[in-house]
Amino acid sequence: MIKKEMIAMLLAGGQGSRLGVLTSKVAKPAVAFGGKYRIIDFPLSNCINSGVDTVGVLTQYQPLRLNTHIGIGIPWDLDRNIGGVTVLPPYEKSTNSEWYTGTANAIFQNLDYMESFNPEYILILSGDHIYKMDYEVMLDFHKANNEEVTIAVMPVPMEEASRFGIMITDENRRITDFEEKPEHPRSNLASMGIYIFNWKTLREALIAMADQPALDFGKHVIPYCHAKGAPLYAYEFNGYWKDVGTLNSYWEANMELIDIVPEFNLYEEYWKIYTKSEIQPPQYIAEDSVVERSIIGEGTDIYGKVYNSVIGCGVTIGKGTVVRDSIIMNQTRIGEGCELNKAIIAENVTVGNQVRLGVGEETANETTPHIYNHGIVTVGEKSVIPNGVSVGKNSVIFGVTTPEDYENSYLPSGKTMIKAGEQA
């Protein structure tokens, strides 16, 4: 029988609804990041860099682009005869068929997959965080304490602690208590959603709690293990870790890549981030164009000026166009004489000539201010913006729009324009 010491289960089925139109057609882990990557590249690269060569990727919501991206795992050296990467969507069973209803339910539905590797340890990961972490060091910590469950935690500012699952530990880092998003936190150690379980402990907990609706690690599995007296320990991580779950945190994480001394370095030799790269020609920067403090993807043609921005692969930026503080994803075309300020533009968008995005006073978004805020203009994938229109801040455009959609060629701040047939 095959035996693997530790296998990883990567939860990548989330919709990521707080990313608005960016995730209406694609799962959050497949959203483009940093000019050439997708969010899932980071945990997958961490796995192979940590010597974890067996990864089950649990998909559910809009999985097509994610599945195509992962393929058979070649970019991450995960195309193995034994192990490697396996995409695990929900499937029909003879007794009952159901979607994955919670993080732990998704793992429970794949007990047979895990059993087939006869592992000693299971590493549970989330597919939507940006970070570099050596899981082998965490496993060493887990073994050293004879633990049954290790939860990766990171210190957060006390005033932000109420947004997280918080672990309370003794002087040996043993977890004595935990609170889910407490109003008055007793500790600042936030759970990162990264767990190492002894396989026997996890298996028993999942089977015992299987009937719980929306079976979840934080709400059900961890409390069950704790109540049974299983030793739980907190492994403290002090590196860069970013949950890019909101448009603003996604925008910030991209902008942090182009800091003069980036807090998160994509260029380290010893901890590479791998991705599936399209075959693209090199970038072309025209004679009178300007590029300052930006990431420019392969196959991109720049005829205008780009400042402090992250530009994906195969993008065209027309003559006389000025792009500032923006993220433009793959295969998007920006016309001539445009002005873009703090815009997030998804893949395969067409922006006409003389278009101005992110202008005027800032007003709260009329439909979903909790998603579209911080002055960002968001444009969903395959959208079309016609020539000569101006768009205010905190606005969102999704779909093929025409000049008739813009009264006096203007979409004011805080407006939502989502064309029929497109879901936000």
Image (cartoon, helix red, strand yellow):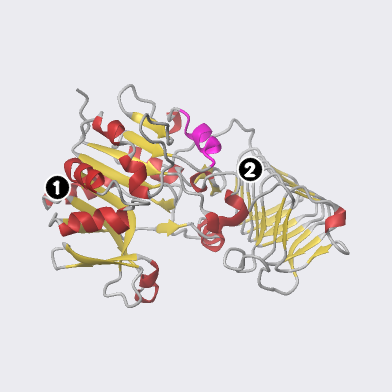
211 or 88: nearer the viewer: 211
Residue wearing tag 1? 143
Task: Specify the amino acid type for callout 1.
Answer: Lys
Q: Is residue 407 left or right of residue 219?
A: right
The spot of residue 144 in percent (x, y) is 12, 50
Q: Nearer the viewer, mark 2 or mark 1?
A: 1
Please give the name of the residue rendered at 42% of the width and 33% of the height, measured from the top-left corner: 91
The spot of residue 15 in percent (x, y) is 51, 49
Mark 2 neighbour class, 10 Å CA radius: few under 14, some 14 to 19, many 20 or more: many
The numbered disc on residue 236 is none
Please give the name of the residue rendered at 21% of the width and 35% of the height, measured from the top-left corner: 119
Mark 1 neighbour class, 10 Å CA radius: few under 14, some 14 to 19, many 20 or more: few
273 or 251: nearer the viewer: 251
| Start-end of magenta stretch | 62-71
Residue wearing tag 2? 330
Task: Specify the amino acid type for callout 2.
Answer: Asn
- Residue 157 is drawn in which quadrant? bottom left
